[in-house]
Image (cartoon, rainbow, N blue to C red):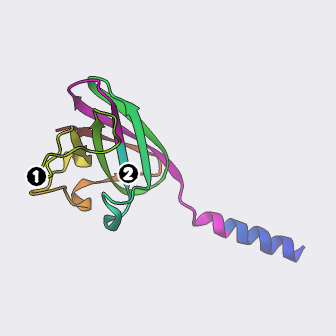
Amino acid sequence: MKLFVNLLAGALLAGAGMAQAADMTVGIEGLKNANGQVLVAVFDRAADFLKQPVRVAAVTAQQGKVRVSIAGLPAGDYALSVFQDENGNGKLDKNVIGMPVEPYGFSNDAAGSFGPPSFQDAAVRLADTGGSATITLR
C-alpha cells in the first residue's frame, strides 16, 4: 500500500509541473493573390529565431486573408514568421541583394531596420487558455 501511495504522489507531482497545451489562431492579412501557400513558423526562443521553429503550419493562399490554427503549444512567448510561397518552392525567395521578393511578415507586425526584427520585438504571449495573433504581409 505504501508503494502505491508513493507512486500516486509521484505521478501527481510530475503532472503538476507539466505545461497545459493551448491553441494559437493566426490571422494573416494582406494577401494580394491566391498563388501558392502561406507558411507559418513558430519560434519559442531567441536563440532559435528564424533558425529552428518549434512548429510549422501551411495553408492554401487566398486573396485577402487566411487563418491558421496551431494546436498544442504550451503557454509562453512565441515569435512567428510568415511568408506567402507564391511559386511553391518551399522557401522565401530573395533578390540579388537579399531582400524578399515574396510577401512576408512577423508577429506584432514587427520590422527590423536592416534585416528581420528581433525575437523580443516579434514575441506574442500565449495564455493557458489560448490566444491569437494577426500578421499583415508586406
The amino acid pointed to by label 1 is Ile
Residue drawn where x is 23% and y is 43% of the image: 93
Task: Name the residue that disc number 1 marks.
Answer: 97
Residue drawn where x is 90% and y is 73% of the image: 1
Q: Using the image as rendered, state which of residue 138 and residue 23 is in the foreground.
A: 138
Query: Distance from label 1 to label 2 (Cα)?
Result: 26 Å
Task: Name the residue that disc number 2 marks.
Answer: 42
Q: Where 131 falls versus 6 (above or below)?
A: above
Outermost right residue: 1
Q: Using the image as rendered, state which of residue 92 and residue 131 is in the foreground.
A: 92
- Does dot 2 land on a helix, a strand or a loop? strand
Q: Residue 55, how many percent across, how many down?
A: 44, 50
Q: Residue 66, how many percent across, how many down?
A: 33, 29
Outermost front residue: 96
Q: Using the image as rendered, state which of residue 12 and residue 115 is in the foreground.
A: 115
Locate the C terminus by quadrant.
Answer: top left
Q: Residue 62, how many percent across, how many down?
A: 31, 24
Q: Where 138 falls versus 74 (above or below)?
A: above
Q: Which residues are magenta?
A: 13-39
Residue drawn where x is 72% and y is 72% of the image: 10
- Does dot 1 land on a helix, a strand or a loop? loop
Residue 6, quarter of the rendered image: bottom right
Q: Which mark is residue 124?
A: none
Q: Residue 91, how many percent across, how many down?
A: 31, 45
